[in-house]
Amino acid sequence: METFGSRLHRAMAERGPLCVGIDPHPALLARWGLSDDVDGVARFSETVVEALGERVAVVKPQSAFFERFGSRGVGVLESIIRQLRGTGALVLLDVKRGDIGSTVAAYADAYLDPSSPMYVDAVTASPFLGVGSLAPMFDTARKHGGGVFVLALTSNPEGASVQRAVGADGRTVAQTIIEEISQLNAGAEPLGSFGLVVGATVGETGHDLSGVGGPLLAPGLGAQGGRADDLRTVFGNELSSVLPSYSREVLGAGPDHAALRAAADRALADCRAALTAAGQ
């Protein structure tokens, strides 16, 4: 079975290092002239799939914007996941789940088991009940060739009070997370299946990412204030593992297909330039 890390490495080589979100929040729906209901969310999401599904390496639906409409919204999400799979894009579901024991195992079954209607290539996860609490998710990902991106250094200002807190061993919480994920990827080639989420707006982190061995998802680009050039500051010598992620900067160009594609192409060109600037 091919690992998620291998599939992602190939997708980034073939389509370029770019992840585009599907975030149908009310302001974007209104900007597109769509209603803030299940029908509007469905049309919005289908348009993104049609315009970008065959062009970008990774598409990242944000689960919350579908869940807010209950079972009908989740039904749209299931449909969008199926449609994305048909385009060849890898599907990263942004759910940021985290729990313990049988509960996190159930989350893993929901998203990383091929028998589930919400089965995707990878998910985001929160490690703040301890990285070890996510073990059932890692195990399910290994079993089925999936991936997990674990929050480490997020762009929101509130995150620093927890993520940069220093433990008794002198390491920050974030560095502890980084090192535990690095261990999961030990020996993986060409890229591990367990990644980290490190915001593009966090600046010089003061953290060591050199041994991660897996992908580094960089949200916060575009409308959230991050620029492609910032990736060099945040990730230093680890640029070859970075997966830049855009949402509103690209989605705001819709609903015209050509405009969405042009926005994605501009984002990709900016990222390619930044990620190769240091000879990567």
Image (tube, grey):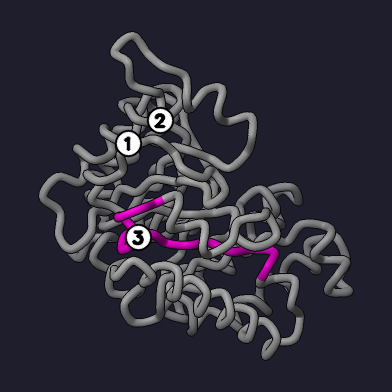
Taking the spot 31% from the left edge, 26% from the top edge, the residue there is 132
Question: Which stretch appears magenta?
Answer: 235-249
Query: Which of the 4 quarters of the picture holds residue 254?
Result: bottom right
> Element at badge 1?
helix
**Few, some or many C-alpha atoms within 10 Å of disc 2 (few <14, some 14-19, many ≥20)?**
many
> Element at badge 3?
helix
Kind of residue sitting beneath label 1: Ile
- Residue reaching furthest to the front: 278
CA–CA distance between discs 3 and 1?
16 Å
Kind of residue sitting beneath label 2: Ala
> Taking 50 as reference, is 196 above or below it?
above
Taking the spot 68% from the left edge, 79% from the top edge, the residue there is 47
Q: Is residue 111 visible?
A: no
On residue 239, the disc is 3
Question: Of callouts 3 and 1, which one flags the residue occurring earlier in the amino acid sequence?
Answer: 1
The reply, left or right, for residue 214 in relation to residue 73 is left
Quadrant housing the C terminus:
bottom left
Residue to which mark 2 is pinned: 174
The reply, left or right, for residue 220 in relation to residue 213 is right
Task: Name the spot of residue 228 as percent of width and height, x first.
Answer: 53, 64
